Image (cartoon, grey):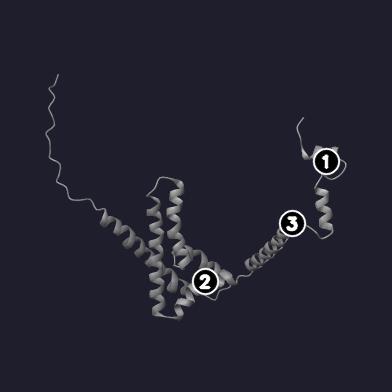
């Protein structure tokens, strides 16, 4: 016959030894410190969860990011165009570096570790990636950002796409090609095929 909590509760008429004492202490306000700590932590977590839930309902976060990624660069003019281009070059350099670094190992954990750092760097530094911006900016526009499609393409999507191409091609693709270019070798000598007598 297997033991289960339900069958034990049926057999016992009162609370288990030790549990009743803890319940009595809690009712008297003498709850163990562990219970008080967990209750306080639960209150803090639920308050934080309500803050996150309310922040998700407000479109201000993604709207502000969309405005910063377009009107923010437009406000500083030519310097903004150079800034967005350089940030795009650096971004795709990091993305391509993550792919190349992941190819240096055969283990799954090694691939994850190698790819993690460059992607973390581009995300933490706020670099510009055209594919990410294809989601962020239109979503901000749908949520009420005062951005036109012309602003999006002129001040972000076109320079970011060009910068991503330069970063991926020059800093990664061309660099790997130059460093691993095959050397010039002498052509293999031509050999006459051996003739097999006919039967």
Q: Is residue 105 left or right of residue 26?
A: left
Front: mark 2 or 1:
1
Callout 1: SS:
helix
Disc 3 target residue: 35
Is residue 61 visible to the viewer in this orientation of the structure?
yes
Q: Is residue 30 left or right of residue 90?
A: right
Q: Quadrant of the C terminus?
A: top left
Which of the numbered marks, if any, corresponds to residue 9?
A: 1
Q: Position of residue 195 (x, y in %)?
A: 12, 27
Seen from the viewer's position, the closer of residues 179 and 92 is 179
Which of the numbered marks, if any, corresponds to residue 66?
A: 2
Q: Is residue 187 left or right of residue 109?
A: left
**Of callouts 1 and 3, the N-terminal one:** 1
Q: Position of residue 192 (x, y in %)?
A: 11, 33
Crowding at dot 2, Cα within 10 Å, few <14 / some 14-19 / many 20+, comes out as many
Crowding at dot 1, Cα within 10 Å, few <14 / some 14-19 / many 20+, comes out as few
Residue at 77% over, 37% down? 4
Seen from the viewer's position, the closer of residues 168 and 37 is 37
Callout 2: SS:
helix
Callouts 3 and 2 close, C-beta under 8 Å = no
- Residue sitting at the far right: 13
Seen from the viewer's position, the closer of residues 12 and 17 is 17
Q: Position of residue 65 (x, y in %)?
A: 53, 71
Q: With respect to residue 27, does 75 lie above or below? A: below
């Amino acid at each position: 016959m297997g033991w289960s909590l339900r069958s034990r509760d049926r057999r016992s008429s009162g609370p288990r030894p030790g549990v009743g004492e803890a319940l009595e202490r809690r009712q008297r306000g003498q709850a163990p410190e562990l219970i008080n700590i967990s209750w306080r932590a639960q209150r803090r977590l639920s308050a934080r969860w309500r803050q996150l839930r309310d922040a998700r309902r407000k479109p201000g976060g993604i709207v502000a990011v969309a405005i910063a990624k377009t009107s923010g660069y437009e406000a500083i003019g030519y310097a903004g165009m150079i800034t967005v281009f350089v940030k795009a070059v650096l971004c795709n350099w990091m993305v391509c570096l993550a792919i190349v670094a992941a190819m240096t190992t055969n283990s799954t954990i090694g691939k994850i570790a190698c790819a993690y750092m460059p992607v973390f760097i581009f995300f933490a530094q706020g670099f510009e990636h055209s594919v990410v911006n294809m989601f962020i900016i239109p979503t901000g526009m749908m949520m009420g950002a005062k951005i036109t499609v012309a602003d999006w393409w002129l001040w972000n999507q076109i320079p970011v796409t060009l910068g991503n191409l330069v970063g991926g091609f020059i800093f990664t693709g061309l660099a790997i090609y130059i460093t691993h270019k095959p050397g010039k070798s002498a052509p293999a000598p031509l050999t006459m095929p051996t003739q097999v007598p006919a039967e």
